[in-house]
Image: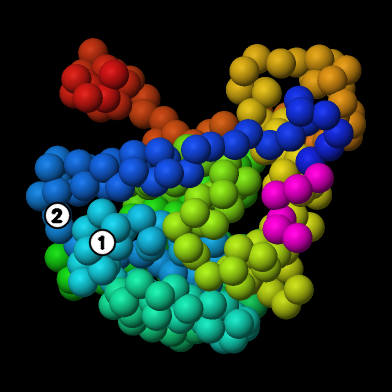
């Protein structure tokens, strides 16, 4: 079975769906407009992790820009699963895009040797930020633009490293819940191995996103979609969600709001950047 089932009973408790054909066409047009028309950049650089999010992003970029203009960067750490590298290879083989492997162990351990007591969370954040350093430097090397791969569920739950995963200047899948990313992946022809495996940040053995979050993506997507429509915790519980799941999602949504914004600027004038000074396209 694919991983987007069994959110709950009844239509209200199911994750939101998309029209994958329309969505794919829209996102391809978005990438072409944002990269070529607005920024005059013809090439994309993507951090290819072996997961479904980066795979979908690679498939979209290949459609939008042509496979010859897409550079996929694999960035393993010494504890990374070999299966992740193999799954990333499936994507590059399917698309015919460029692939480069940059081993980040030396860079990560060069810092962590100064912080031997760092726990798993801190170590994971260091890895994520080193990967983003690599991605931006590789974009300079290939005269390309880094393209983000974070989905809407991760972003709303704060399940990402600030100034790392959400740093690339454009993101075609950032308004797609994880369940919708799986839908789009099936439509685009992403290899089944990537669609069916348990999502993981691949920071340590046997780690999975859903075990970290304490809830399945399907249930989280269904709850989040209704929370954004204005439903209260009580209304969601009345309509079939467990109080535990609703409280868990609400706590993460409210507690990570700061991660979805640029650094807060102390305003001294009426031309503070991103507070008052905005281009027409920013409104």
Looking at the rendering, the stretch of residues picked out in magenta corresponds to 1-6
Q: How is the image coloured?
A: rainbow
Residue picked out by circle 1: 44
The Cα–Cα distance between marks 2 and 1, rounded to whole angstroms, is: 8 Å
In-front residue for pair 167/60: 60
In-front residue for pair 163/86: 86
Residue picked out by circle 2: 41
Q: Quadrant of residue 138?
A: bottom left
Badge number at residue 62? none
Q: Residue at x 86, y 34 (%)?
A: 9
Q: Residue at x 89, y 31 (%)?
A: 242
Query: In this view of the protein, can residue 128 be seen by the observer?
Result: no
Q: Quadrant of residue 78?
A: bottom right
Q: Is residue 64 above or below residue 227?
A: below
The N terminus, quarter of image: bottom right
The percent position of residue 15, horizontal first and vertical second, equals 68, 36
The percent position of residue 257, horizontal first and vertical second, equals 57, 32
Residue 5 in magenta stretch: yes
State whether the magenta stretch is mostly helix, strand or loop: loop
In-front residue for pair 163/96: 96
Q: Is residue 211 above or below residue 12?
A: below
Q: Residue at x 26, y 54 (%)?
A: 64
Indicate the secondary structure of the residue bearing disc 2: loop
Q: Is residue 22 above or below residue 110?
A: above
Q: Residues within 10 Å of mark 1 (few under 14, many from 20)?
A: many
The percent position of residue 183, horizontal first and vertical second, equals 57, 49
Q: Residue at x 64, y 41 (%)?
A: 157
Q: Quadrant of residue 275?
A: top left
The percent position of residue 240, horizontal first and vertical second, equals 87, 26
């Amino acid at each position: 079975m694919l991983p987007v089932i069994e959110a709950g009973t009844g239509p209200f408790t199911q994750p939101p769906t998309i029209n994958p054909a329309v969505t794919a066409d829209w996102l391809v047009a978005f990438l072409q407009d944002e990269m070529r028309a607005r920024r005059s950049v013809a090439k994309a650089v993507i951090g290819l992790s072996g997961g479904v999010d980066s795979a979908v992003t690679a498939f979209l970029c290949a459609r939008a820009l042509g496979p010859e203009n897409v550079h996929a960067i694999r960035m393993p750490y010494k504890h990374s699963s070999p299966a992740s590298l193999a799954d990333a290879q499936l994507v590059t083989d399917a698309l015919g895009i460029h692939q480069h492997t940059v081993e980040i162990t030396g860079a990560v351990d060069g810092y962590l040797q100064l912080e031997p007591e760092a726990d798993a969370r801190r170590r994971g954040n260091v890895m994520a930020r080193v990967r983003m350093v690599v991605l931006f430097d590789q974009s300079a090397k290939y005269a390309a633009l880094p393209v983000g791969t974070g989905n809407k569920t991760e972003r709303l739950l704060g399940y990402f490293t600030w100034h790392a995963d959400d740093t690339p200047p454009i993101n075609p899948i950032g308004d797609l819940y994880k369940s919708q990313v799986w839908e789009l992946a099936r439509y685009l022809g992403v290899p089944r191995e990537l669609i069916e495996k348990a999502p993981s940040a691949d920071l340590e053995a046997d780690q999975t996103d859903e075990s970290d979050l304490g809830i399945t993506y399907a249930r989280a997507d269904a709850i989040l979609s209704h929370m954004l429509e204005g439903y209260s915790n009580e209304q969601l519980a009345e309509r079939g969600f467990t109080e535990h799941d609703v409280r868990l999602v609400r706590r993460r949504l409210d507690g990570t709001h700061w991660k979805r914004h640029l650094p807060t600027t102390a305003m001294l004038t009426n031309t503070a950047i991103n507070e008052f000074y905005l281009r027409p396209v920013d409104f």
